[in-house]
Image (cartoon, rainbow, N blue to C red):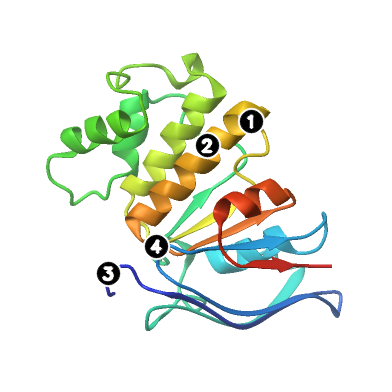
Amino acid sequence: MTLNPTLHIQQVQITLNGERLLAIDRTIAPGEVLTVMGPSGSGKSTLLAYLAGFISPAFKAQGQIFLADTRLDTLPAEKRRLGLLFQDPLLFPHLSVGGNLHFGIPQHTANKQPKVAQALHQVGLAGYEERDPATLSGGQQARVALMRLLLSQPHAVLLDEPFSKLDMALRQEMRSLVFRQLRDAGLPALLVTHDHADADAAGGPIIELG
């Protein structure tokens, strides 16, 4: 896999009960965020599920997904090297903040502790390694989830309305943080949202469904 590969979504169509929900044919460059917008039921999250490899059998999907020259849609989910960020941080409650970040780092990586410390420093949470995730604010949990994702060294990132549960002030802060980190890492990303402010902050092309 080349460093910072391009994500190719080639003639992907998703249908439900024989009715077409969406059709997308797009390339997402390294560091670019493609935003897919639409009302509930338009197929946004189903598209992410197809890319990630866990689409519900109720839906039928066709088309190909490539990261550089590696075809993803024929691979199991765990081999696709896609990072996912959801509405909820989904931190492991039985692990400390540091433990959550350690979990994200690939097993073969040496010297994990400095990487964890650096990640926390990057998002203003230096010294939080031993903290229980339940004691963090929503914004702090979101930052830990973002750094866990980045430490996992994904080749592309899927964002499923990751700002929708945050209050307005925090939302703007997290948008800036997430999109800056993705640009700095040179990762292609697909964002699904119904919030135009998310799309504006992402700064990339927009597809409107429905």
User: Is disc 4 in contact with disc 3, using a CB cutoff of under 8 Å?
Assistant: no
Residue that badge 4 annotates: 81
Cα distance between the residues tagged 3 and 1: 32 Å
Cα distance between the residues tagged 2 and 4: 23 Å
User: What element does badge 4 sit on?
Assistant: loop
In this view, the residue in front, 42 or 180, is 180
Cα distance between the residues tagged 2 and 1: 9 Å
Q: Residue 166, labelled with which disc?
A: 1
User: Is disc 2 in contact with disc 4, using a CB cutoff of under 8 Å?
Assistant: no
In this view, the residue in front, 30 or 45, is 30
Q: Earlier in the sequence, mark 2 or mark 4?
A: 4
Q: Earlier in the sequence, mark 2 or mark 1?
A: 1
**Residue 200 position within the rendered picture, expressed as x and y whole percent measured from the top left:** 63, 53
User: Is disc 4 in contact with disc 1, using a CB cutoff of under 8 Å?
Assistant: no
On the picture, is 19 further left or further right than 139?
Answer: right
Q: What amino acid type is highlighted by mark number 4? A: Arg
Cα distance between the residues tagged 4 and 1: 27 Å
User: Is disc 2 in contact with disc 1, using a CB cutoff of under 8 Å?
Assistant: yes
- Between marks 4 and 1 in the image, the one whose residue lies nearer the viewer: 1
Q: What amino acid type is highlighted by mark number 1? A: Leu
Residue that badge 3 annotates: 3
On the picture, is 163 further left or further right than 7?
Answer: right
Above or below, 144 against 9 in this view is: above
